[in-house]
Amino acid sequence: MADIMDPAQLWADRDALHVHGVEVALLTEGPRPEVEHDKDGAVIHLQAGPAGPTLLRLAVPIGDAVGYWHPAAGWDRHLVADWAGGWRSVGLVASAPLGCLYDAAGSALLAFASGRVTATTRIRFGVAEATARFGVWLAMDLRQGEGCHVRVQAPGRSFADTMRALTRRLCDGDELPTPDAARTPAYSTWYSLHRDVDAARVEAEAARAAEVGCGVLLLDDGWQQRAQGPGYSGSGDWTPDPAKFPDFAAHVKTVQGLGLRCLAWIAPLLLGEQTLAHEELREFAPHAVPRLSCRVLDPRHEEVRRFVTEACVDLVRRYGLDGLKIDFLDFAMVYAQEEGGRSGTDVGVAMRLLLTELREGLREVRGDELLVELRQPYTGPGMLGFGNLLRAEDCPADATANRVRTLDIAATTAGSVHSDMLMWDPGATAEAAARQLHSALYATPQISVPLAGQSADHRAMTAFWLGFWRDHRDVLTRGEIRAGRPDQLYETVIASAGKRAVITYYAEHRVAPLRLEAFTETALVNSTAAAHVALDVEGRAVEVRLDAADACGRPAGSSVRILGPGLHSIPAPPSGLCVLRPVSPADCPR
């Protein structure tokens, strides 16, 4: 594929199609693309042809473009030059082949999604200095008789609406069922205990987690034998450490008896140097990661897929677990550009085979109640068939990153999105700690602080915000979400469902517009250090009762006001909230 990635080829003149203002050009030999229009946009069909590399370019004038978003954007959401970005590999376990160029109003200018979500695609994008155009290039090594389709969404809709419309069409209807437990606050042992876990400590924390409203416990790294070695040198045998968990099945039952589903961490592609499995499987793990003291199993080998499936299914069956937290699947991408393996050369195809076998084995044990956590970057629409807890990548104590990452995942999937584990300084104020929970409001929160040593204020704060989340979860996670522009990091988020709305202010001096008359309850969450938030009332005036609460949920004042059209300053304590409700039936929406 190297010859088609020559930068000189990026803007080569070709006979192009024009679809909703997007120039579509095939830069390699092959049948001319065909276009099928529908009400939302168009589908570009690359017809099956001889095997070989294929390079497709999508381009538009930059116009009022201010940013470009894709699932692996991280903090890099600006407009890069076409010579600066380079090529990146995406596939089933690494991001997804989709993206959106948007303008100052947050409306899509160029939004696309490739249906090739499994096999590896190489992507590049950027601005052409000489012509003021923005281009996206998709490089694919298509097999004999393999075609591909790329959807281009009609421009003008908001970023959020556009991405929802695109990703809905990428789901193949084979999603893993999402039981109610997948949308229940969770407790993770990782940041709170790290590898210093044992049955007594975990069970004590599980009891406290149940008391504050958690319904799932994730037992992270440290439960297995040889876990205390450097890096992941002990990963591969996947048997409980008898010194820490003398009866692991009984431990799992104890946790479940507290009302919690119990999941265990596993990194099935990592092969530690200190394990018994190392000698048996080393030949199938050519890539070494010295800093982690392990190797990476190559999923293109049948022997690897069988080992991973048997290890995971046996763990759930033998000990009665409710599911697994499956980590480091993205490491398989080290084989994306290499030849070898017995199931073909594409690592995405091999991972789909592995995950399909694993899913079927696990569902035989747990049925529709199975819980599987997957983590960024392998949370794209192609993974909905294999996981139902889609978690933000690790960002300890970084509330901004947690907010951005969970909302990014929500833009690309209809699954149950989970926050990274929430941690905070035990000596911090309740207001500072509450902002960590606020960062996870639009996902399912996972907390990971030592609950045994919490202060009274921290305990009250945790219980209050988890209770608020449970009471509003359908609004927060399944309602209509307006989060603004990706490059502005979603500083004000508005969610609504039915007659309820929640607005969260993550930065001071931001204004949220709302037609107040449409709702019987509007909760304004103030995730800042200010004492007020700003509401821009649209529509007619409404007389409302304002009930404020501080970060711990303690009442902080009530009043009645008539809020007419225009800007209003609403009192809300730092890290607290103010709830607005109409005071008379005449003010209630019909």
Image: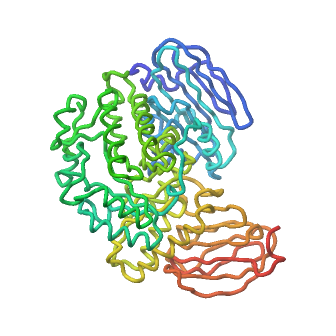
Q: Quadrant of residue 520?
A: bottom right
Q: How many marks?
A: 0
Image quadrant holding the C terminus, namely bottom right
Point 41% across, 67% down: residue: 258
Is residue 580 or residue 156 the one in the foreground?
A: 580
Describe residue 433's horizontal placement relative to residue 526 as left or right. left
Is residue 540 or residue 585 the one in the foreground?
A: 585
Looking at the image, residue 485 lies above or below residue 584 = above
Q: Quadrant of residue 89?
A: top left
Image quadrant holding the N terminus, namely top left
x and y, in percent, of residue 172 in the image: 58, 35
Point 48% across, 14% down: residue: 144
Q: Quadrant of residue 358?
A: top left
Looking at the image, residue 527 lies above or below residue 162 = below
Looking at the image, residue 202 lies above or below residue 1 = below
Is residue 530 or residue 142 the one in the foreground?
A: 142
x and y, in percent, of residue 329 in the image: 36, 41
Looking at the image, residue 386 lies above or below residue 537 = above
Describe residue 566's horizontal placement relative to residue 551 as left or right. right
- For the rendered model, the colour scheme is rainbow
Res. 471 visible in picture: yes
Point 20% across, 51% down: residue: 225
Is residue 367 or residue 498 the one in the foreground?
A: 367
Describe residue 391's horizontal placement relative to residue 407 as left or right. left
Res. 129 visible in picture: no
x and y, in percent, of residue 405 in the image: 47, 54
x and y, in percent, of residue 496 in the image: 67, 62
